[in-house]
Image: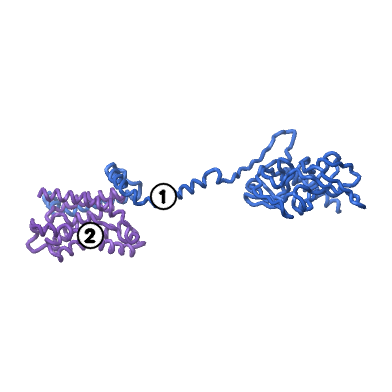
Chain colours: A blue, B purple
Amino acid sequence: MKNFFAFLSKYHKELLAIALQVLCLTIFFINNSFQRLTIISSSNAVVGSVYAEKNDLTKYFNLLEQNNKLAAENAMLRARVKEAYFLSTRKNFYRHDSTQIQQYSFYSARAINATTNLQSNFITLNKGVMQGVRKDMGVISPSGLVGVVVNVSNNYSTVLPIINNRFTASVEIKRTKNFGLLKWDGVNSRYARIEDIANHARIVKGDTVITRASSAIYPTGIMVGVIDEIEQPEGSNYLDLKIRLSVDFSKISTVYVINNLMKQEQLQLEKETIIEEQR
Amino acid sequence: MRGDIVRIFFRFFFLILLQTVVMNNLGIASGLIVPLVYPLFILMLPLLTPGWVVLLLSCVLGLCIDAFSNTLGLHASACVVMAYFRGVILKGISPREGYDITQKPTLQSMGSNWFMTYSVSLVLIHHVWIFNLENFQFDFLFRTQFRVILSSMFTLGMVYLSQYLLYQVSERRR
């Protein structure tokens, strides 16, 4: 026992140093491995008040940096407001009725760009593949036929409108049921022509022209325009009809993209029929 | 004696504030130099302070620095090592007749050779310990030793500056 106390008194510094070192290293490694020991850290009241005083002194030194940070944050928040967003929901309206099968559904879209003064005009819509728009879907506006989707990207699509010299569509005269081919002559964006209506058809000025479902793109009965001029060329069996389009392409904004749910079925059947006929 | 104790406590709080409020915010040479001034407290403790008092005071000092720096245990550990080796080195470089109650561990009191051995060795021990414990991996080993050397030079510069600024005046007055 005497030796033990002698040992203690001789090596008390070393023992104390080792004990303190073990303590320090223990809390150091605990602190590094786990959450900070909050007992003695900057959350402590004394430390906190000292830092608050220090902050009062030093907060003016980094005003420039703070301003830059706030500006960056403003930019970030600006990017989050509604106006910066592209509405990407699929607005697709269905009706459920067991006695009827829905054939067409509609996506609303906005024409964000349209040309009217070229020979090959196009319209750009703010809906694309992500919103359900596909190639060869019909496009109408509240006032009538617009055209057909020819190209789609993820969020945009381009429409080939009536006023493009590559556009054709099968249309009929609502009253007489005569049908012909709608084309644009490239002269005036308010007028188009209808070919292939036989000259025995009793068509008068002011007759309504509507779409036909023959190409599986548009439903029947979409307004196209009204007959404006009827000409009967010499020696021809067909009438030359000039129609006034119901859609003013220079003012186009809201449009609907038509999704024909039975398009595949119709096209498949027609294709099979053609193949069988050729045998 | 009482004046000494008051002075020691004043020095304790002053160095903690200087270290945490000023020095911890200085980034010199992109982190290569970490300015540490508080080892001056351990260096300046009276020569005849009992070893256990030095150890306990150093440990408390280190913990205070840690509390401000959110590095719990790191500075305390280095301070304990430094405090232990302070006793060893003081014994090793003591004059033949031992230390006198009137002597202080200052440049003016003990002479430049003694003071250089004392301060350089203790600051190096402290810095080697703290930087390697902080790093605690073999990556960046070379860079860590580089930081030790540069930071030690900075600390020693502060130590010598304090000697010329504070103690020379009091020596002259005497």
Query: Which chain letter goes with mark 2?
Result: B
Would you call the spot at circle 2 few (<14 residues within 10 Å), some (14-19), or many (20 or more)?
some
Which residue is label 1 attached to?
A: A67
Image spot of residue A23 (x, y percent): 25, 49
Disc nearest the viewer among 2 and 1 = 1
Marks 2/1: CA–CA distance: 35 Å
Q: In this view, does B8 lie above or below B97?
A: above
Q: Give me the residue at 27% from left, 58% from top.
A: B129
Q: Residue A145 vs residue A50: left or right? A: right
Q: In this view, does B30 lie above or below A108?
A: below
Residue that sits furthest to the right in the current view: A235
Name the kind of residue labelled 1 in the image.
Asn
Name the kind of residue labelled 2 in the image.
Met
The number of discs equals 2
Instruction: Residue A179: name its quadrant.
Output: top right
Would you call the spot at circle 1 few (<14 residues within 10 Å), some (14-19), or many (20 or more)?
few
Q: Tell me if residue B1 can be seen.
A: yes
Q: Residue A194 vs residue A80: left or right? A: right
Q: Tell me if residue A262 can be seen.
A: no
Instruction: Residue B80: name its quadrant.
Output: bottom left
Which residue is label 2 attached to?
A: B158
Image spot of residue A238 (x, y percent): 89, 49
Q: Give me the residue at 78% from left, 43% from top.
A: A225
Q: What element carries label 1?
A: helix
Query: Which chain letter goes with mark 1?
Result: A
Image spot of residue B115 (x, y percent): 16, 63
Q: Residue A16 vs residue A179: left or right? A: left
Q: What element carries label 2?
A: helix
**Front residue of this view, candidates A16 and B2:** B2
